[in-house]
Amino acid sequence: MRWLVLLGLVAFSECIVKIPLRRVKTMRNTVSGKNMLNNFLKEHAYRLSQISFRGSNLTTLPLRNIMDLMYVGNITIGTPPQEFQVVFDTGSSDFWVPSDFCTSPACSTHVRFIHLQSSTFRPTNKTFRITYGSGRMKGVVVHDTVRIGDLVSTDQPFGLSVEEYGFEGRAYDGILGLNYPNISWSGAIPIFDKLKNQGAISEPVFAFYLSNISMKRKVIACSGGCEAIVDTGTSAIEGPRRLVNKIQKLIGARPRHSKHYVSCSAVNTLPSIIFTINGINYPVPGRAYVLKDSRGRCYTVFQENKVSSSTETWILGDVFLRVYFSVFDRGNDRIGLARAV
């Protein structure tokens, strides 16, 4: 079992939400998230005096790693509770699942929320649309009770999809956004902000187990500084096409269809790609940025960022997060990173 720790908007003095990560059909060995947590707490001992675990509410929620491409966990909605598998996404703010009145083919392959079976359901007339890199959806805002482990958000606003495109056959039913309220397409308050307002948690901090990017000490991108998004909802590392193609060329990756392939025998000799953030280097080794397809061929995880209009915006997805334990401190608008050991 692999552990990824989510201090789900951690209330250090009141509530710790710890999520163990269970790998399913994995392609490589990864580090133990349990060790990550122990090391993190050891390195930040100065804060332990402020933490009281006595009488704390410890919630354990299993996540599944789907082919090293995404992490999904179970939550429930309604009274009595209906269970769904969702992606915990730091790159978005909206929370939605399929509705029972969605007729799109994608909805028929997932669990749909049956609103008539919930006594705490409350509808609204507000509609919204969201376009992701992997698909798009149209939904309506509703309210109901939502549970993440032992955390309960009553009268939580969220979305029910009425149309979905691009989500057919995905291993999750919906998406649970963890980002700031001001980027919510539906205008609904995100669940962790609602939990904070309800007093279920006391600190807006959660954790998951760019000035420039360099390789072999040579700057290959972001020479003048650039922006980066740490995103659990993205499996790859995405950047501008010109710079991504430059990286592919430097590591000897050859294009084939939608992917760039390298020799599997050369993976351990590939150079690390180093992301420098606030003067600190965060190397990602070849064994981390190369995956295997269904035929056992090795391909790189660097992809073009087709969503952002900026020429210097990078998205550091799950590939990066498997190498670095990340803490999202929304209360102080900062992210902490520590080597996963």
Image (tube, rainbow, N blue to C red):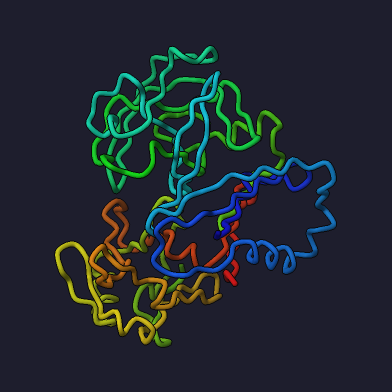
Q: Which residue is drawn at 26% across and 40% down?
A: 168
> Relative to the observer, which residue lies in front, 319 or 112?
112
Is 77 located above or below residue 182 in the figure?
above
Q: Residue at x 54, y 66 (%)?
A: 324
Q: Which residue is at the front of the view, 75 or 217? A: 75
x, y (%) of residue 245?
Answer: 24, 72
Residue in the picture at 34% in, 27% down: 161
The residue lying toward the viewer, choosing from 83 and 226, is: 83
Give the side of residue 11 with respect to residue 51, left or right.
left
Residue beneath the point at 44% across and 57% down? 229
Question: Which image quadrant is residue 223 in?
Answer: bottom left
Residue 333 in sight in this render: no
In the image, 140: left or right of 329?
left
Quadrant assignment for the C terminus: bottom right
In the image: residue 283, left or right of residue 313: right
Residue 68 is situated, as x and y percent measured from the top left of the image, at: 40, 60
Q: Position of residue 264 (x, y in %)?
A: 29, 79
**Count of numbered circles in the view:** 0
Residue 277 appears in the figure: yes
